[in-house]
Image: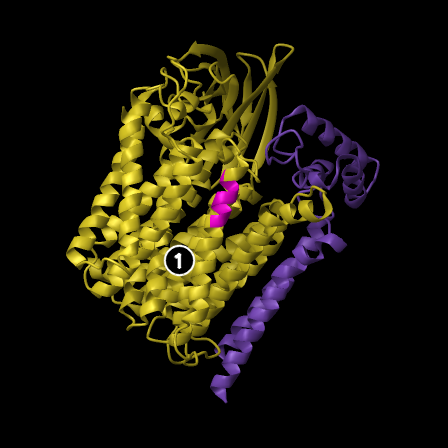
Chain colours: A yellow, B purple
Amino acid sequence: MSSLVGFLSLVFAIGINFYLFLSRYIFKFQKQKFNLFIRFSSLLTLLSFFSLMYAYVVSDFSNYNVFQNSHSNKPLIYKISGTWGNHEGSMLLWLSILSIFSFFFSFTKNIEDDFQKLTLIIQAFLHILFGLFIVFTSNPFLVNSILINEGLGLNPILQDPGLAVHPPVLYAGYVGYSIVFSIAIAGLFQNTDNEWLYVAKKWSLISWTFLTGGIALGSYWAYYELGWGGWWFWDPVENISLMPWIAGLALVHSLMMVRGEQAIKKWIVFLSILCFSLSVFGTFLVRSGILTSVHSFAADASRGIFILLIFFIVTGFGFLVFLLKEPKKSNTLNLLFINKVSALVINNILMIIATLTILLGTIYPIIIEVLYNKRISVGGPYFNSTVIPIMIPGFLLMSIAPILSWQTNKINNSKKYVLAFIILSVLVLIQSYFLDFNTWGFVGLLLGFWIILASIIAIFSSYKIKINIKFFKIINPHVAHIGVGIAIVGITCSSVFQNELDFNLSEGDKFNINGKTVLFEKIETTNQINFQSLRGKFLFDIEKNQSKEIEAGKNYYPVSKMITSEAGILHQWNKDIYFILGDQKNNEWFVKVLINPFVSFIWLGVIIMIYSGLIAVTRR
Amino acid sequence: MKSSHFFRILHITILGFMFFTFKIYALETIDERVKKLTLELRCMTCQNQSIYDSDAEFSNDIKKIVKQKLQEGESEKDIKKFLAERYGEYILFRPLMNYNNIFLWSFPFILLIIGLFFVLIKTKTKKA
């Protein structure tokens, strides 16, 4: 029953969007009525999504999709998140978020009616494309041909709270760029004043903030669930999410420069189209199964081809309009040796180079395989030695960019900065002499601390300190950059200064970590609702009264016959102590302990970036 | 004027720590060299995991081989070459700098040069 409701409302919503799309040419109607239709179609799409979710919650195995991906003894939260833990459901989620964005956009005030309408028509067009994709290749409402009362279960690695919220947040970022795309295309068609750029700025900030959150959730999940001790692996799927993120960052920054300069307008439109194209392209790469990863679910060539088609339509259409309806002749940029405009231009160039490099590195193995029938890998070392050096000048620049002037190339208080930089370099050099010296460690720490320090100097020397909302809005760019600085420090420390200790232990053994005694108490096995767990219990710092207990082990999921590793992490503000329980041999357990310094700084930095993303949305 | 000071100081700092690096580079232990090398090798039986990070049987074997070969005094390049011949280039996370991969390695730096030119040209026209 719910499947029927879901399918019908999905099809009906596509129908309405088709009608709206045609309304540009045939049956024109008023704005009021138009917006009502848009909202109605959004609600229908949501109805469709929630009826799928309902089927998951009540474990309705007459739905083939539920049968394939769910099991009646899962906890409720994983029944709900199971809705998007598979290809069909996640595409429906994609479409629902698209229609939610249209829904909210239809309420936007202070833009021209025609402009809003055109934007929504382009949204309707995208809705039709992705809607048809779902109906024809990935229908989540197929009926199970046999009567059955148990399902096959959800991939246990996805049964995790972090991963339950990761896809919706990430998709909100990806799909949010659809609105930015539509606004940019509508802007090209109408070629009106620059008012639309402010609207685009708002929506691109919203999308970027969601994307940041989504990527961070995913990488935090990888940190504690994969049990490898790292949080970023330059996995193709991670790269794919990073591309629209960096391009989106470039977009947000170039939207700062909007002051009616045509050259920049062209560039903004280009970036808007690029961001959404990269989002769709990412979906294609992940869903087609060309890249194998946790995300690729069941691979099916016909889906890949269909998404590739959508990608070519969207990108082709976007860039075609861009070429034909190019904004009018450009003014020259006010580039001086070092002023705000040149800083922003350089930052944009570097970000685009980084994006394209990641793109090339990600698809290069595919190209080589097609051309030479040979498999090669392009992994972390490649990206580390290309993308990071390219970004370094950008990082240096961002420390002072927000206080540069638009017009002149004078830097206020430049002596302070030079002095601060010298003192900082000496301090970091001395620090690195006593610790293990490492080039990357040195560069990373210097950059990170320099960004933080320069931003703080800038805040204190350029503005009057007040505690009110307006002040926080003014210093927001600095705050965002401090977030980046903190994250860089965290990234550097946790990757360069990571320490590994290996032990072979029997139950009851004591061992030493950084001078603290740790007791390997016991091994415990328990039966949970949907898995069996094996846990090694450790007591950290037993000499103290408040010793901390850490559990590390493995889970066995009988339904899907899979073993997942569950790392035990002791979080401290300045380091994470990361326990991995290995295999048993001769009555001894292999235990790996990683000491990751300052990991918490990464997440703190990301939280600050998300915060300033949100603040920036409220600022005009 | 001010900014040239800034760059000069930056220059000196960079030279300073490069000197440090070369001094300390030679003091690496065998285990550190094994770590550095195995971090750049793919565990063929895992999903996008490096041999260093993995505890799979395959990875442990390769770790042993690498350590043995380093102790015998083989260079990192030779070891990589040996592994690539045995398991295919797929095992190398850092693609070889050969004819096939010229584009891959030069692309970012070509873009960088183009970008630099763009900025320089645009800056000049303004001054003139």
Q: Residue furthest front?
A: A26
Q: x%, y% of residue A156?
A: 46, 23
Magenta span: chief secondary structure: helix
x, y percent for residue B33 = 71, 40
The residues colored magenta run A303-309
- Residue A113, located in which quarter of the rendered image? bottom left
Query: Which residue is identified by label 1?
Result: A481
Assign a secondary structure to mark 1: helix
Q: Position of residue A365 (x, y in %)?
A: 64, 46
The residue closer to the viewer here, A85 or A246, is: A85
- Quadrant in which residue A592 is drawn: top right
Crowd class of label 1 (few under 14; some 14 to 19; many from 20; radius 10 Å): many
Q: Is residue A94 rendered to the left or right of residue A534?
A: left
Residue A170 can be seen in this image: no
In this view, B15 is above or below A246: below
Does A473 sit left or right of A514 as displayed? left
Q: Residue at x 30, y 59 (%)?
A: A119
Q: Numbered disc 1: what chain?
A: A
Task: Determine if the magenta segment contains residue A7.
Answer: no
